[in-house]
Image: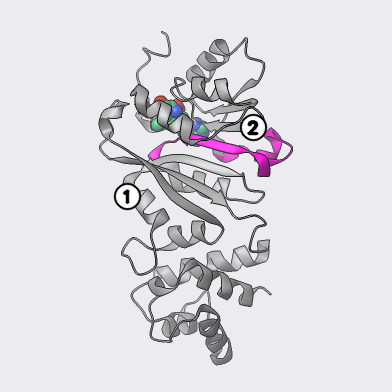
Amino acid sequence: MSREHARPRRELGQNFLVDPGTRLRIVEAAGIDPGDTVLEIGPGRGALTRGLAERAGTLHLVELDRALAAGLEEEFADNSHVHVLQADILEVDLTSLVADPSALKVVGNIPYNVTTPILFHLLEPPRPAEILLMVQKEVAERIVSEPGSRSYGALSVGVQAVASVERVLQVSPGAFRPRPNVDSTVIRIRPHVPPPLSPEQEGALRRLTRSLFQWRRKQLRRILRDHPELQCSPAELEALLAAAGARPTDRPETVGPEGFRAMAELLAP
Ligand code: SAM
């Protein structure tokens, strides 16, 4: 059976992009120059791949589905700058693909059920230069959300503390086959260069976001003092609040990414 006719595998989040206008807008938004090395995650039946292959100097494709990866191998057999790897992106170390991941541009219309793990995998240092991802609209909202809003949380801080983020394009279910049950948004993530936090500070940031947003309805004073992962002394508590520019009675969602970064720097100097 050809890959166009194989039944889409729901467990792999296979909603293929069929709208030509949306395909082109995403490829153009990736802003690829002939000197660029690009990684496409989950190329599937090649909806974005053809446009990316025309523009990139080198294109790496990582596709988990064996039949789809074999189809891409066949289609791009004569394009020596296109490399197909049949693998789970979560198990691929970017440094095994390219010598310098910090110059890499990543593009992906990825399965919605693994968006967050894929995103955090890509944000492990050394980070790519730029990441353009199609995600569920609600997840995009959480990623770009600002302090004080209901969707602001651990995901917003985890990404915005180390990168700038922006919405690029809204995509409706009709652009895909089969149609997903949700709207989609393409987002662009540009990791800060140089990375603003050391690896130890990033560990502290993860601990802080996890603990604070786990108890997001409580006041900062109470969480920093009582959460089992934090248990700060009165002096630590005062220093952390000063670093974050927050009052003891504030709630976690009022602290911006820079406030979280300042607290992480204090916890792991
Ligand atoms: N890029 C294609 C498009 O726009 O039509 C396909 C998009 S589809 C939403 C997601 C693709 O990711 C599928 O081809 C699926 O097989 C692949 N995939 C799912 N999980 C993956 C993983 N962990 N690693 C790499 N590819 C994966």
Residues in magenta? 90-112
Marker disc for residue 264: none
155 to 175, vertically: above or below: below
Q: Residues within 10 Å of mark 2 (few under 14, many from 20)?
A: some
Q: Quadrant of ligand 1?
A: top left
91 to 239, vertically: above or below: above
Q: Is residue 184 magenta?
A: no
Alpha carbon separation for disc pair 2 and 1: 31 Å
Residue 178 picture location, percent across and down: 29, 25
Type of residue at label 2?
A: Asp
Element marked by disc 1: helix
Q: Which label's residue is closer to the chain start, 2 or 1? A: 2
Residue 30 picture location, percent across and down: 51, 35
The residue under label 1 is 138
Work out whether residue 254 can be spotted: yes
Residue 261 picture location, percent across and down: 56, 69
Q: Identify the residue shown where x is 66% and y is 65%.
A: 200
Type of residue at label 1?
A: Glu
The residue under label 2 is 36
Depth check: 81 or 83 in front? 81
Q: Identify the residue shown where x is 70% and y is 36%.
A: 96
Q: Identify the residue shown where x is 56% and y is 75%.
A: 263
55 to 208, vertically: above or below: above
